[in-house]
Amino acid sequence: MTEVIIALDFDDPENAVDFAHKIKNETSWVKVGLELFIRGGPEVVVRLKQMGFYVFLDLKLLDIPNTVSGAVSSSVDIGADMLTLHILGGEKMIQAAINAKNRTTGEKSKIILLGVTLLTSMDQDDLPWPDRRDTGEIVCDLARRAHTLGLDGCVCSGLEAGRIRKMTDRDFYLVTPGIRLEPAKDDQKRVVTPEQAQASGADFLVIGRPVIKNADPVHALREIKKRLTRNSEKFQ
Ligand code: C5P
């Protein structure tokens, strides 16, 4: 089943929590990213957990192994259910993250560690290094490494999810941001519709602005869920 994660990209924790109350009956997953976490800290994660949400802590860790190990342990302690780290951090950093996860016990040990491939806001022109491969190949290469090294899944766009699904296990989570209901002129470049992401095998769709900036966010989210249900019925 494809789940929707709503990105609570708010600069005020109170607004984020108020918004979470509005969508409580429509989704069980929310994402806390850098903007909200820097303002609201662990407390906002704890409050969302107390409301019954699963919390995706999208901190996109990239640091030395010892620091990332500590950051994973801290994220586990505050109750995060899902956490991101950059695959570009390399094998030792990723191993340190997995070891930190494996040191935890009970419910909290189920935290999902996701490797970030290439941000969905980037295309060939945005690469910081010259590379003859297209973005799809680079993303698939990073995803393969994440899978081999033992991460639980990766973040990719819906454009690459199908290829990654074919080369990994069914239980390797594919999480796709860059979801747009219609063409939009913003910073996201590798975008697909919810239906395309679902058909590509994505397990979780991360959706921010198309819902949180909508005049009627609950209606927008219901419409997305309806579209996903209709789409999945086509394949049954
Ligand atoms: O508003 P929009 O739907 O573009 O939000 C997408 C969310 O997904 C943002 O919170 C962004 O930080 C996050 N994200 C992303 N690309 C990644 C990883 C996370 O857009 N590779």
Image (cartoon, rainbow, N blue to C red):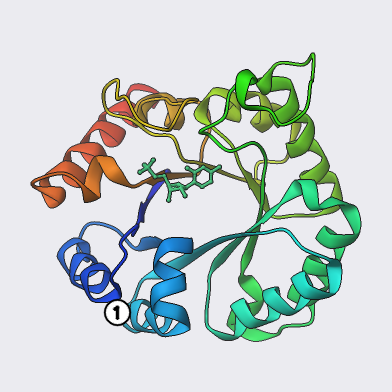
Q: What's under tag 1, amino acid-wise?
A: Met
Measuring from the top left, give residue 16's x and y in whole percent. Answer: 27, 68
Q: Residues within 10 Å of mark 1 (few under 14, many from 20)?
A: some
The residue under the point 46% across, 40% down is 177
The residue under the point 25% across, 73% down is 17
Q: Is residue 160 visible?
A: yes
Query: Ligand 1 is found in which quarter of the picture?
Result: top left
Q: Is residue 33 visible?
A: no
Name above or below for residue 30 compared with residue 102.
above
The residue under the point 39% across, 77% down is 40
Measuring from the top left, give residue 4's x and y in whole percent. Answer: 36, 48
Classify the position of the N terminus by image quarter. top left
Name above or below for residue 140 compared with residue 171.
above
**Nearest the eye: 62 or 151:** 62
Measuring from the top left, give residue 164's x and y in whole percent. Answer: 68, 30
The residue that label 1 is drawn on is 51
Measuring from the top left, give residue 48's x and y in whole percent. Answer: 35, 76
For mark 1, give the secondary structure. loop
Name above or below for residue 134 compared with residue 212.
above
**Nearest the eye: 234 or 90:** 90
